[in-house]
Image (tube, rainbow, N blue to C red):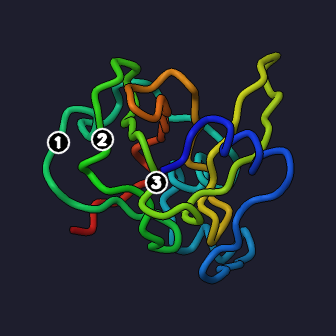
Amino acid sequence: MLKWNDILRFALHGNPKPESRVEKSDEEWQQILTKDQFEVTRLKGTERPHSSDMCSLFEPGIYACVCCGTLLFDASTKFDSGTGWPSFTQPIQENAVAYHKDTSYGMVRIEALCNTCGAHLGHVFPDGPPPHGLRYCMNAICLKKVG
């Protein structure tokens, strides 16, 4: 299981290799995504907090990237962080998510992206519940429940 030091190492020294890569032009992404999905996933936007009922849904299942379908999170790692965005403690596989240092808006954060297609998902923080202490704060619009 990943810990904060692993996330920092990936963000600063390189991410694990993904199972595969999906690359499309902006025009191709715009053809398959809604305007809001494109804004968040491809242009690194953020949805409003509490804009999705996904935060309060705690059913078994798997969450995938809305862009490419890569499996990202198991619902068993989902928790109510009170932030207004769906939160998870671990990705489904170590190489499912990529990490980049994000210094936008005068903050230093770790951006979480789909490691297959590069979609912006949200950010990961070291203030999650034990035992691993991670909080993957994801934009609900970036995820689709597939199982």
Give the left or right position of residue 62, taking residue 110 as reference: left
Q: Earlier in the sequence, mark 3 or mark 1?
A: 1
* Label 1 CA crowd tier, 10 Å (few <14, some 14–19, many 20+): few
Tell me, yes or no, whether the two marked residues, 1 and 2, touch with CB atoms within 8 Å. yes
- Viewer-proximal residue among 19 and 5: 5
* Residue 78 lies in quadrant: top left
Q: Position of residue 57 (x, y in %)?
A: 18, 40
- Viewer-proximal residue among 5 and 49: 5
- Viewer-proximal residue among 34 and 40: 40
* Residue 7 lies in quadrant: top right
Q: In this rendering, which labeled residue sits more in front, label 3 or label 1?
A: 3
Q: How far, Cα to Cα, is label 1 from label 2?
A: 7 Å
Element under label 3? loop
Kind of residue sitting beneath label 1: Phe
Kind of residue sitting beneath label 2: Lys
* Label 3 CA crowd tier, 10 Å (few <14, some 14–19, many 20+): some
Q: Position of residue 84 (x, y in %)?
A: 37, 24
Residue of label 3: 91
Give the left or right position of residue 18, taking residue 67 as reference: right
Element under label 1? loop
